[in-house]
Image (tube, helix red, strand yellow):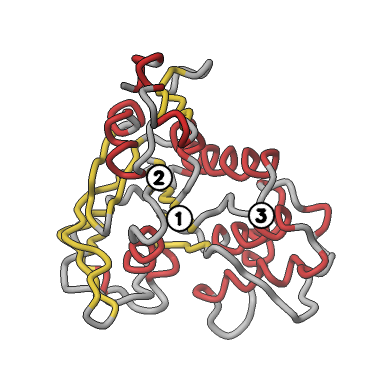
C-alpha cells in the first residue's frame, strides 16, 4: 500500500521555547529522505512529532491526507515504525524475543504462527538470524542496532523513522545499516526518513534531503540541490569543497578552521 506523508506548517515548542517553526515537506512511498542540520536544529523533535510521541497542532502531520491524530494507538504502529537513537535492555531477552515485541499491534489474545514467521523472515532479511537466541545485551552496538530495526520492521510499517541510526557505529556497520534502508525502500516500497549528521552518507543514500536551521526548513531537494557550498556555509558555518564522488553524488569536504583566515581561501577558488 503506497502512502504519502505530508508535513504541513508543523510547529512545536518545549514550554515557551520554539523548536520547530512552519516545517513543510512531503515524502512519497519508497523514498529515502534524510534530515540534516546542526545539533539543536530540531531533527529528533521532528521525528517524534511525525510519530505522535510529541503532540502537534491538528493537520500538521498527514498520512494520505488524514490527520495523524485520527489513527488509533493500534493503527499507527502498523503504519509508522520508529527507531530511536539508543535502545538498551538490562533484561536477558533474546534477540528473537526483542524483535517479537514489535508484533504487539497485531496481537489480540495470543501470538499467531504468522507472528513467528514474520520475525524469522525479518531476521533473515537483516542477516541476523544466526544469533536469534543470543541475549540482546550481549551484542555489539552494530548488532543491537540491527535488532532494533528488525523490531520496527516486524510492525510492517509503510513509513520508517530513524533517529541517528549510524551514531556510535564504525564505518562498516554504518554502510550496512544504510544499505539495508536502501534495500528496504526498494524491495518493500517503504518510505524511510532518517536524521543524520554525516553529510556524505546522506548524499549517498538519500533521494531527497531536508536541511534544518534553528527549527526552520532551510533547504529541501535532491542531494545535488541541497548540498552546496553556500548551504553548508549558511547552516553549519564552515567552508567546504563540494565535488562529485565516484558514485556521482556530491562529496562534502569540510575545510579546517585555519583555512578560513589569513586569505588562505584565495588559493582555493572552489570554496571562495
246 relative to 127 in the view: left or right: left
Q: Residues within 10 Å of mark 1 (few under 14, many from 20)?
A: many
Indicate the secondary structure of the residue bearing disc 3: helix
Indicate the secondary structure of the residue bearing disc 1: strand
Cα gap from disc 3 to disc 1, whole angstroms? 14 Å
Indicate the secondary structure of the residue bearing disc 2: strand
Residue in view at x 53 percent, y 15 percent: 246
State the image coordinates of residue 248 (x, y, percent, origin top left).
45, 17
The residue beneath circle 3 is 146
The residue beneath circle 2 is 34
State the image coordinates of residue 57 (x, y, percent, origin top left).
18, 73
Circle 3/circle 2 CB separation < 8 Å: no
Cα gap from disc 2 to disc 1, whole angstroms? 12 Å
Residue sitting nearer the eye, 12 or 143: 12
Instruction: Judge depth for marks 3 and 2 and give the one in front.
Output: 2
170 relative to 190 in the view: left or right: right
Quarter placement of the C terminus: top left
Cα gap from disc 3 to disc 2, whole angstroms? 19 Å
State the image coordinates of residue 259 (x, y, percent, origin top left).
44, 28
User: Residue 64 falls in which quadrant of the image?
Assistant: bottom left
Disc with the residue nearer the chain's start (3 vs 1): 3
64 relative to 101 in the view: left or right: left
State the mark number for residue 160: 1
Q: Is residue 61 above or below residue 223?
A: below
Amino acid at each position: 500500500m503506497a502512502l504519502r506523508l505530508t508535513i504541513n506548517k508543523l510547529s512545536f515548542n518545549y514550554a515557551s521555547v520554539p523548536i520547530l517553526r512552519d516545517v513543510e515537506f512531503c515524502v512519497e512511498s519508497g523514498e529515502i529522505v534524510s534530515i540534516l542540520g546542526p545539533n539543536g536544529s530540531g531533527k529528533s523533535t521532528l521525528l517524534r512529532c511525525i510519530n505522535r510521541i510529541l503532540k502537534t497542532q491538528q493537520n500538521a502531520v498527514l498520512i494520505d491526507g488524514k490527520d495523524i491524530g485520527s489513527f488509533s494507538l493500534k493503527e499507527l504502529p502498523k503504519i509508522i515504525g520508529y527507531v530511536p537513537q539508543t535502545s538498551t535492555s538490562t533484561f536477558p531477552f533474546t534477540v528473537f524475543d526483542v524483535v517479537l515485541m514489535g508484533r504487539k499491534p497485531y496481537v489480540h489474545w495470543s501470538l499467531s504462527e504468522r507472528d513467528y514467521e514474520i520475525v524469522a523472515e525479518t531476521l533473515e532479511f537483516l542477516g541476523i538470524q544466526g544469533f536469534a537466541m543470543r541475549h540482546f545485551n550481549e551484542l555489539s552496538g552494530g548488532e543491537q542496532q540491527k535488532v532494533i530495526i528488525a523490531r520496527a520492521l516486524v510492525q510492517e510499517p509503510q513509513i520508517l523513522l530513524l533517529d541517528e541510526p549510524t551514531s556510535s557505529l564504525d564505518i562498516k556497520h554504518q554502510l550496512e545499516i544504510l544499505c539495508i534502508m536502501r534495500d528496504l525502500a526498494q524491495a518493500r516500497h517503504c518510505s524511510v526518513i532518517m536524521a543524520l549528521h554525516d553529510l556524505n552518507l546522506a548524499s549517498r543514500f538519500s533521494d531527497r534531503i531536508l536541511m534544518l536551521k534553528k527549527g526552520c526548513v532551510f533547504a529541501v531537494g535532491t542531494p545535488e540541490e541541497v548540498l552546496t557550498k553556500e548551504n553548508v556555509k549558511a547552516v553549519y558555518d564552515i567552508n567546504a569543497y563540494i565535488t562529485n564522488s565516484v558514485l556521482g553524488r556530491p562529496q562534502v569536504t569540510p575545510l579546517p578552521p585555519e583555512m578560513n583566515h589569513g586569505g588562505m581561501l584565495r588559493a582555493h577558488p572552489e570554496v571562495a
